[in-house]
Image (cartoon, rainbow, N blue to C red):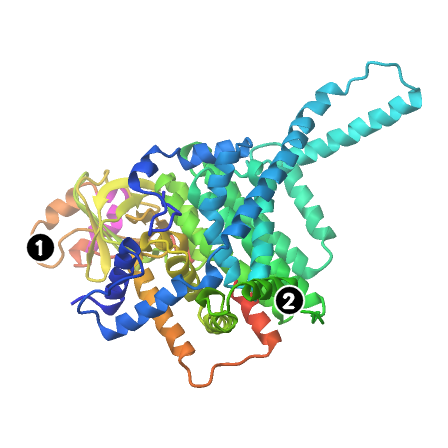
Amino acid sequence: MFSWWRSSGKRDKASEEQAPSFEVQLDRAKRGDKEALSALYYQFLSLVYGTIATRVPDRATAEDLTSEVFLLMIEGISQVHSTDEAGFGAWILRIARNIIAGYYRKRHTQPEVIPLETPHWEEEELGESQAIPASHPDYDPVRLTEGREQWREVKEAMSHLTEDQQQVILYRLICGYNVATVARMLGKNPNAIKALQFRALHSLERLLNAPTPVRQTPRAQVRRQEGGL
Amino acid sequence: MKPLSDQFDDELERRDANGWVGGKAYNLDPEVERLVTLARRLRTTPELQVDPIFAHRLEQQLHSRQAALQPVRQHATWRGWLLPGRQRVHPLLSTAVALGLILLLGVGVLAAAHGTENPNNPLYGIKVWEQGVQVSLAGSAPDQAELYLQFARDRLDALKELADDGHNEAYQKTLSDFDQQFTLASQQISSLPPGAERNQLTAELATLNTDAIHTLRGFLPHLGLSEQVVTTNELGHLGAAIPQITSVEVTLPTHPNGQATVTIHGSNLQSGAQLLVNGKLSIATGILKGGGLVFVVEKWTGNQHPHSIGIQNPDGTATQTTNVTVKTNSDDGDGNGNGNGNGNGNGNENGNQNGEGDGKGNGNKPILLRTRDKQK
């Protein structure tokens, strides 16, 4: 069975040998073992957060939806039949996809609310940036805004890629799983994944370097993001 | 020289091993270098890094939630045993309690049925009925489609527990249920008007399709032959590449237990495939030759005409057909050995034809056993 750990490695080989098997860890988590639950949570956090963050407009929403996914994981964990990482990963990704779908469905049926005041999370960020000298590169408001704008462009460009290309970029390049793992996740052979990631990145580069970026109406953007789940 | 996609992947692996901050590999193609820079940008984008404060806060929240749920779960388990009354109660109250218990029992049966995944379990019928009620109570067509998708996913999960030699019947039944739910979801979605909701459900259906292909392919090595055949058919329904037989020609030996040749034409036939005769594996390995898969069977059982021929590819996909053309391997034309060929028992079943035919030089006349459009 493949490993859902990043190929960059959060744990070394020796610790991997000592660590309990996934099945044992999952069983402990089901019985309420705090340590096992934390290990499980951190094992899938990047994957869940990455999946959501590439599909929703901002960090605050991504964090909210990530919380919902893990709370549902806690509620449903005792009923999960899968005992391997792949099965469990597929289950948790399914929850994430349903949560994202619910989010867009709600957004579609409810009129968009435009706040009169700055959202609290922006205030927090502004507050932090004001508390720290503006010259600090990590907290420079201009850099933060630029970074957010660049990420928005990347997401918009990604929404023009095919579903396979989006998935390979997410799993391979953003979450950092190795080719063999991504191949198993997508049911393709490793060479196809290599070619797909190359083409995907090529297309992304082309879209990002387009002289006039493709601009869409917010509604069309929502539709594309929904379609890209 | 390696293709650029391989060079790019090698560089990603190198960066994953050595860290993304640091020098680049020498002699890197400029195009690959550009893409590596973009990959690095994606990998290190702050928007995708989980905020450690958020991660810690959520971890605490999860622990609190787990702690809150734990007693409820334990309580739910033991409450039933602790309920029997120790005091005399009013008859009206006892009737209400009895009704309550009946209701509880009914709900319990429904709950137990809900968790049943084996179609051989008597509660499975209740589960199917319960799901039918859920669909009929769903408020809108998109909700119904969502339910069908959910049921199809449940069946796919259930198959994981059944994909071994001990659950053949249950596996086939669940696979058939999966196919039914998937088809219903697909039909329901295609009947929706164009719009965001339909796009969303279409994307969910596509994801399920991909998951199902991946999962079913993984089962193949663990399944029995007949389950491999039905799984291959299902993979075909899902749009995966599967072997398909268009024609089969069996050249029977002129004498019992002689050498027979089976030539199969079709698509996605893999070299190294095993031959299936009448639904059973035969000791013969196929070789791709002249666009077809050729099997040489050293000892063909008597002069038996096969009623079905199939193949099992090395990847576990398997298919069969009853559309089989049978020829007799008799020499025609030059008269060498004709006597032997005709004299040896071929006449038992079709000796009249062969006996007359050989003399006129058309001993290879095909005998079409059965013709069906549909492969078995």
The chain letter under disc 2 is: B
The location of residue B288, given as percent across then percent down, is 21, 56
Distance of mark 1 from mark 2, alpha carbons?
Answer: 70 Å
Q: Which residues are magenta?
A: B346-357
Query: Mark 1: which amino acid?
Result: Gly
Tell me the residue that label 1 is attached to. Answer: B335
Query: Mark 2: which amino acid?
Result: Leu
Which of the pair B331/B109 is nearer the observer?
Answer: B109
Snapshot quadrant of residue B340: top left
The location of residue B154, given as percent across then percent down, is 56, 45
Disc 2 residue crowd, few under 14, some 14–19, many 20+, Cα 10 Å? some
Q: Is residue B184 visible?
A: no
Tell me what residue is drawn at x 59 percent, y 48 percent.
B151
- Left or right of B279, for residue B75: right
In the picture, the quarter occupied by the N terminus of chain A is top left
Tell me what residue is drawn at x 46 percent, y 71 percent.
A154
Disc 1 residue crowd, few under 14, some 14–19, many 20+, Cα 10 Å? few
Tell me what residue is drawn at x 35 percent, y 43 percent.
A11
Q: Earlier in the sequence, mark 1 or mark 2?
A: 2
Q: Is residue A136 visible?
A: yes
Tell me the residue that label 2 is attached to. Answer: B192
Residue B336 position (above or below residue A11) = below
The location of residue B20, given as percent across then percent down, is 31, 60
Q: Name the secondary structure under disc 1.
A: loop
Question: Are circles 1 and 2 on residues that touch, CB within 8 Å?
Answer: no
Residue B248 position (above or below residue A205) = above
- Left or right of B193, for residue B38: left
Q: Is residue B356 magenta?
A: yes
